[in-house]
Amino acid sequence: MKEKLDAFNLHTVCESATCPNVGSCFKRGTATFMILGDTCTRDCGFCSVKHGTPAPPDPDEPRRVAEAARELNLHHVVITSVTRDDLKDGGASAFADTVRWINRLLPDATTDLLIPDLHGLKKNVATVAEARPDIIAHNLETVSRLYPLARKQADYRKSLSVLKMVKEINPEMYTKSGIMVGLGEKFNEVLEVLEDLRSVDCDFLTIGQYLQPAAENIAVHEFIHPEMFERFKNVGEEMGFRYVASAPLVRSSFHSEEALQQIKS
């Protein structure tokens, strides 16, 4: 799997963000492509993706992602990116171009995009939505109170507004968001995040345990008991999320294809 990805000169968030599921996903022949390079313009406390000044976008990258997806015989293609605050559209056009290339080369494949906040501008969100991916995801990552610790260059309300904009542009499009627990959040704060997500009609929810990826990242405040993850799942389903994945090793793309098939059936 790694050799095939390297042959197309592509990055995956699986490797760049040291995801704990990388082995099992690669074994199943799945991966989350990370477009727009491997250098983020932000430096979030929880994330191990390198940060700094990124290179200009590669205009051929969308085609290579689609070619790689075809080579890997993927039925469901998950795509994310580093945050590109240096770009006027935040990278929206690159996401849209990638979806169009996938639709051209793999017309039966579904697509799941995990986008950055795209400067919180509706025109940028519309650029992505108009390419008609199956799912547009944007992670809140943690509770509002912990943004200065974990997402100091982001804004909780702006992130929430991105999900709202997707539904305003296309009410039929599925949206998804995810959070980490174990950073010091309180139970009621997690419930507030879930309520906020339902207020913008978010369809999919993922909740996983924060694991410190490197020594320079935020330390784990608490390891959450599996029974609490099950409680979060039950509460989320009661609130009306169409699909909830809640367990210690759950991440944004966790069983994404199965989740989409489940709510479509």
Image (tube, helix red, strand yellow):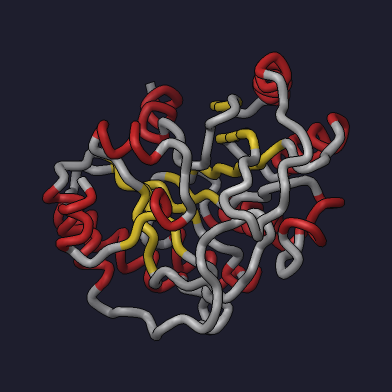
Q: Where is residue 20 shown, x and y percent of the image?
A: 47, 38
- Apparent side of residue 263 relative to residue 196 in the rendered image (left or right): left
The residue closer to the viewer here, 246 or 241, is 246
**Who's the residue at 39% across and 52% down the image?**
15
Q: Is residue 246 visible?
A: yes
**Who's the residue at 61% across and 41% down the image?**
211
**Who's the residue at 54% across and 84% down the image?**
86
Q: Where is residue 94 shown, x and y percent of the image?
A: 37, 71
- Apparent side of residue 6 relative to residue 253 in the rendered image (left or right): left
The residue closer to the viewer here, 169 or 186, is 186
Instruction: Tell me the quadrant of the picture where the N terminus can be found.
Output: top left
Q: Quadrant of residue 193?
A: top right
- Looking at the image, residue 199 lies above or below residue 59: above
- Apparent side of residue 238 relative to residue 5 in the rendered image (left or right): right
The residue closer to the viewer here, 47 or 241, is 47
Instruction: Tell me the quadrant of the picture where the C terminus can be found.
Output: top left
